[in-house]
Amino acid sequence: MNDDLTALRTSANEMRSGEARAFDGEFTSFNGEKGAWRAGKNKTDMDGRRLTAAVMFLIVAWQKFKDGKAIYAGARYVRDGHQLPLREQLDERNSNYWEKTDRDPWQTTWYLALFDDETREQFVWSTNSDGGKDALSTLQDAFADHNEGRALEDYESPIVELGSDWYINSYKKKIFKPILDIVGWCKVPTVFRLPRPPANSITLRVIEHKPGEPKQSSSDDDPSDQIPF
């Protein structure tokens, strides 16, 4: 059976059963203090794994957590030149009410889908760290360079090996950063279930400024801002 039709039928069954998700597979994380890649609730060791990275389907979004659940806003594919909503369109604008007063609960976060061609496992690496952004910047440049002049249907995706490097920061502390070392190129496997940008978990605030009118300060926020579920 045609692989495209099979994917559509699978998607239809998931939607019908309510099982459709934006991200398939285990979430993968990188520990900047230990330099370790881990996946899923069981913290499966991912160091040195070689995975196909779906760069064309890299997603960016605002993300925060509430009661251990991820909340999304403005998620789209990076390839579309998408600009995130303004921070002032989101809730929790008053830093006096943040759980961690030195850290905005909303963070710009990137999501990279990964696939293991040998085990047929799927993973999603989400990151909002400086080291993560550096790794993704390098990966995107390499992807663009490799596919320059190719037809869309001929694009190849990088096969990356999950690794790490380190440096000493200004406080004399050893900090690890993630490395996505490109070891080859391939077409995205047809069995790879591509990620979809998750829907907004909140209603974005409409901002209207009259000419000459100052923007509303975050100190005017209503501390009772709630997520509508």
Image: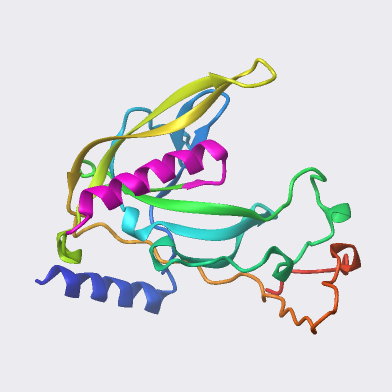
Query: Who's the residue at 50% across and 59% down the image?
Result: 60
182, 227: nearer the viewer: 182
For residue 130, side relative to residue 124 (left or right): right
Q: Is residue 140 magenta?
A: yes
Image coordinates of residue 51 in percent, x first then y, are 28, 41
Numbered marks: total: 0
Image coordinates of residue 113 in percent, x first then y, are 37, 52
Query: Who's the residue at 72% across and 76% down the image?
Result: 205
Span shown in magenta: 126-149
Image colouring: rainbow
Instruction: State which quarter of the image contains the C terminus.
Output: bottom right
Is 133 drawn above or below residue 95 in the view shown?
Answer: above
**Residue 70 seen in this snapshot:** no
206, 70: nearer the viewer: 206
Q: Which residue lies furthest to the top in this view?
A: 172
**Residue 180 seen in this snapshot:** yes
Specify the quadrant of the image occupied by residue 130: top right
Q: Which residue lies furthest to the front in this view?
A: 212
Image coordinates of residue 122 in percent, x first then y, are 33, 49
Q: Is residue 60 magenta?
A: no
Is 33 drawn above or below residue 42 in the view shown?
Answer: above
Specify the quadrant of the image occupied by residue 20: bottom left
For residue 49, side relative to residue 183 (left or right): right
- Name the magenta segment's main secondary structure: helix
Q: Which residue lies furthest to the left in this view?
A: 1
Specify the quadrant of the image occupied by residue 44: top left
Image coordinates of residue 165 in percent, x first then y, are 45, 23
For residue 224, side relative to residue 208 (left or right): right
